[in-house]
Amino acid sequence: MPPRHSWTFWVACGAVFALGHAIDAWPPQRPPRASQLAISRATRALVVAPHPDDEMLAAAGLMQRVHTAGGAVRVVYLTDGDGYPEGVETEDHIAAPTPDDYRGYGRRRRREARAALEALKVGDYAFTFLSFPDGGLSRLMTKYWSERRAAYRSPYTRLDRPPRSEMIVPDTEYRGEDLTQELAQIIAGFRPTTIVVPRKEDQHPDHCAAWFFVADALGDVQRVHPDRQIDLLNYIVHFDGWPFEAEAPQLPPPPGLRGGVSGWMLFSLTAGELRAKRAALQKHESQMHVMSWFLNAFARENEVFSRPAHPHVSLPFRRSPCD
Ligand SMILES: [Zn+2]
């Protein structure tokens, strides 16, 4: 019989492998500090927004800087932001929205997102709406992962799949593995050098789930293209009462949350970038109507990013870490 190694041997092997992997693959060197966020004409930034407006709150300045440098920007919206009863009630002056009302609200938010990107003047911007279920992403990582059960159905729109016009992978339904596949196709096709994506600590379950889906898709892409180096930048939108003190010109990082492997990176906007960010945020009219104070709190002299450790995520999960 071959000798059996003890568990400590395998743990040690795992540690050596993990260390080697970290050194070889991620990050390539010590992460640059805030002021050294390298942006050039070679930059291809993929911004992942769980809902329309997240891209502007988090990265309107960064997107402009990439465009000005001659790089490429693409935004992928995971949901249309349609699962928002208070928003629909405010916008349409109705007490009990129907599935049609929610779908109409989603179309409105998509129009607003396009108008906001236009206002930002980032040139031939590209965007993709995946139209996955608002408020449902976290459950797609667990119960609604595969074809073994019926797809998730939005309690708002009553849809269980994106419109055919928005499908990147044919026959996509509201299942986790379908979302991972769509994201992997986008990443493989766009070839981003940077992916801007929420942190897993974001307290909105869709934002947290966005991180895990991107990390899962990235694993798929890097299995096929191990040579591709992609810089992951995290942003955060929902964390306790942050961001408060909107009257302060600078946006500080959320207290009580560490800045990942990079430390917090405060990305300064020029006066022109800030003006354009404000103008773009105004285009998210429906959101301005319900929470202008929250949106405006992000329109400050800097944006806040951090870099994560190299993710090793393999979905599905038995229990969602996001709820
Ligand atoms: Zn959001």
Image (cartoon, rainbow, N blue to C red):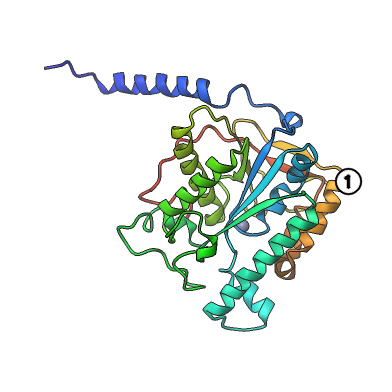
| Residue 175 at x, y percent in the picture | 41, 57
| Residue 35 at x, y percent in the picture | 76, 30
Relative side of 101 to 218, left or right: right
Q: Residue at x 58, y 78 (%)?
A: 101
Q: Amino acid at mark 1?
A: Ala
**Relative to 144, residue 265 above or below:** above
Ligand 1, seen in the image, is in the quarter at bottom right
Relative side of 259 to 289, left or right: left
Q: Mark 1 Cα within 10 Å, few/some/many (few <14, many 20+)?
A: few
Residue closer to the observer: 244 or 194: 194
Q: Residue at x 59, y 69 (%)?
A: 84
| Residue 111 at x, y percent in the picture | 69, 66
| Pointer 1 residue | 271
Which of the 4 image quarters holds residue 256?
Answer: top right
Q: Looking at mark 1, is its residue's CB closer than 8 Å to ligand 1?
A: no
| Residue at the farthest right position | 271
Q: For the residue labelled by badge 1, is the local secondary structure a helix, a strand or a loop?
A: helix
Q: Residue at x 54, y 30 (%)?
A: 228
**Relative to 26, residue 133 above or below:** below
| Residue 305 at x, y percent in the picture | 67, 40
**Relative to 15, residue 133 above or below:** below
Q: Is residue 252 visible?
A: no
Q: Looking at the rendering, in which quadrant would you find the N terminus? A: top left
Number of marks: 1
**Relative to 131, residue 30 above or below:** above
Relative side of 249 to 104, left or right: right
Q: Is residue 36 visible?
A: yes
